Amino acid sequence: MSRPSVRSGWLRNGKRPHELVILQMLLECQNIDSESFSKKLEEEGKEYREADYVSAVRVLTKDFLNTQSEKNKYSLVEFLKSENGIERHILKRAEFLYERLRQMPFKLELQNLIQYGLKKYKDCYSNQDEDNLVLYEKYSRKDICRILNWEKDDSSTIYGYRIKYQTCPIFVTYEKKDDIASSTKYEDQFINNQIFSWMTRSKVSVNSPEAKTLMNYAENGLKIYLFIKKSDGEGSDFYYLGRVTPIEWHETTIANDKGEQLPIMNFQMKLQHPVRSDIYEYFTQ
């Protein structure tokens, strides 16, 4: 069996500093509580929020992992354990980490991961909004599950969008492949630099629960986020274009591969921030 590694792109990518700060503290001391973490986080220029802290702990205890392949991948790595449960916010080094830190190659690897991640955060992601996101930076579905403090990594089941915990991230591939199913060739497009025409998945009617949740976003406190990439050739990351709000909607139809007409909802979404001109031209021209 191979030696456990601490390398993990989704921690060192700097898109959230919280896990990195906890790891840094584990290098310096054994015990961590929410108060000491808060002070350390402020040194990185980030305000403490309990939900973010609990989420970061879930990542480092691997409770965030949601597929067997991911669990197997990190099965030999243990960063921390909770003394009295996560809800008490008292954390301690896991025995694995305590032993590994006595091995200089592992310790140097962990130090390099932390330094690289925090540098990436300061350079690219420190100018975050209230949702811990940066306009026009790129994020994967997995990044968003973590940053929005979802309990589990549901990236494998998000597909185009997912409504959960009063949040709804929408992921759009602007240029659709020719060989995809007809019922998924959604006509998602910019009307102008502040209005985006977006289609739900097929078989969603005006009376569907998720359509009603979207239409009643103001009453139920739903936060809707728009992420777009131009094509699948760009990989798994999407540009974050900010929060959006539905301003118009109607039920229409889309044909499947058999020519059957399926119900689908079309929403006109208003972006909180007009799209920057170079980004807008990149998608539309």
Image (spheres, grey):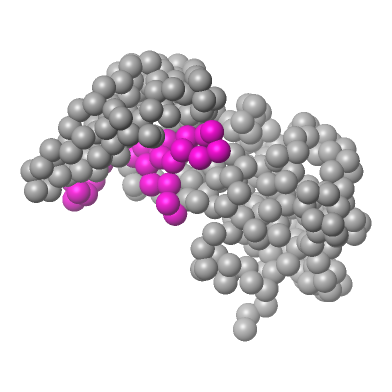
Q: Is residue 85 visible?
A: yes
Residue 2 position in % (x across, y down): 63, 80
Q: Residue at x 70, y 40 (%)?
A: 52
- Of 177 and 222, nearer the camera is 222
Residue 282 position in % (x across, y down): 36, 29
Residue 225 position in % (x across, y down): 48, 30
- Of 167 and 11, nearer the camera is 167
Give the answer, above or below, for where 273 lies relative to 252: above
Residue 89 position in % (x across, y down): 83, 49
- Of 251 and 67, nearer the camera is 251
Q: Residue at x 9, y 48 (%)?
A: 258
Outermost residue, left side: 259
Q: Residue at x 59, y 39 (%)?
A: 148
Q: Residue at x 71, y 60 (%)?
A: 61
Give the answer, above or below, for where 149 lies relative to 152: above
Quarter occupied by the C terminus: top left
Q: Is residue 157 magenta?
A: yes
Magenta residues?
156-181
